[in-house]
Image (cartoon, rainbow, N blue to C red):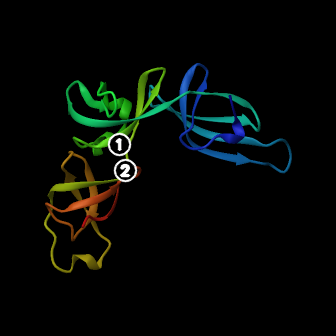
C-alpha cells in the first residue's frame, strides 16, 4: 500500500483493477477544507490518460513492478524484440505498448523494461540518445545566427527539428522525453 501523499511521477498503482502510471501530480492544500492530491495517470495497457483526485493520506495499492536491463535486438512486423542481459531470454513488445519513444529505439540499445507479474508492461529509454541524421535539407554558412529549425530524418526513421547548421551524417543528441534537439555529438 502507498499513501496518496507519496505519489510521484513514474509510480505505478492499481486503480479499479487496472495498472496506472502517474504522469503528473499536484498536492493541493486549499484554505478551506482538507488537502487532496490531483493526478494525471496513464493506463499501462491501453495508453489512455485519466485525471483523478485522491484525498490526502488515502491508501492506494502500489503495483509491484520489476525493472530489468534489456538489449533491443531488432524490430519487424511482429514488434520490437528484446533480450534480457542476464538470462538471455527474449521478449517481443508491440509498438503501442512502448509508445512514442519507440521512434528512438536503435538495434543494440540497452533499455530498462518494466515487468508486472512476469509480463512486460513498458520500456524506459535513456533520457538522451545519440542518433545519426540520414536525411535533411542542406545547411549554409551563417545559418547559426537565427533560431530557425528544419526537419531531419534520423537513422531510426524518426523525424525531429534541428537547427539549420546541422547536416546529413551528423550525429546528434536528442531528449527522448520531448523529442528535443540538444546538440551535436563530438
Q: Quadrant of the C terminus?
A: bottom left
Residue projecting furthest to the front:
86
Is 9 placed above or below 87 here? Answer: below
Question: Do labels 1 and 2 touch, CB within 8 Å?
Answer: yes
Left or right: 42 as drawn, with respect to 108 = right
- Above-or-below relation of 181 to 59: below
Local secondary structure at mark 1: helix
| SS of the residue under disc 2 | loop
Res 101 label: 1
Res 61 → quadrant: top right
Q: Is residue 54 left or right of residue 157?
A: right
List the single residue furthest toward the right. Answer: 32
Per the image, the residue denoted by label 2 is 176
Residue 123 placement (x, y as % from top left)? 39, 36
On residue 44, which mark appears?
none
- Label 2 environment density (alpha carbons within 10 Å; few <14, some 14–19, many ≥20): many
Amino acid at each position: 500500500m502507498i499513501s496518496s501523499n507519496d505519489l510521484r511521477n513514474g509510480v505505478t498503482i492499481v486503480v479499479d483493477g487496472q495498472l496506472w502510471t502517474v504522469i503528473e501530480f499536484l498536492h493541493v492544500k486549499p484554505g478551506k477544507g482538507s488537502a487532496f492530491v490531483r493526478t494525471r495517470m496513464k493506463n499501462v495497457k491501453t495508453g489512455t490518460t485519466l485525471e483523478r483526485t485522491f484525498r490526502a493520506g488515502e491508501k492506494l495499492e502500489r503495483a509491484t513492478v520489476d525493472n530489468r536491463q534489456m538489449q533491443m535486438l531488432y524490430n519487424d512486423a511482429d514488434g520490437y524484440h528484446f533480450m534480457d542481459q542476464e538470462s538471455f531470454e527474449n521478449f517481443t513488445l508491440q509498438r503501442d505498448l512502448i509508445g512514442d519513444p519507440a521512434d528512438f529505439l536503435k538495434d543494440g540499445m540497452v533499455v530498462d523494461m518494466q515487468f508486472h507479474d512476469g509480463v512486460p508492461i513498458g520500456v524506459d529509454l535513456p533520457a538522451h540518445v545519440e542518433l545519426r541524421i540520414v536525411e535533411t535539407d542542406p545547411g549554409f554558412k551563417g545559418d547559426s545566427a537565427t533560431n530557425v529549425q528544419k526537419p531531419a530524418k534520423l537513422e531510426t526513421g524518426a523525424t525531429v527539428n534541428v537547427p539549420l547548421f546541422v547536416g546529413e551524417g551528423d550525429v546528434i543528441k536528442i531528449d527522448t522525453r520531448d523529442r528535443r534537439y540538444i546538440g551535436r555529438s563530438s
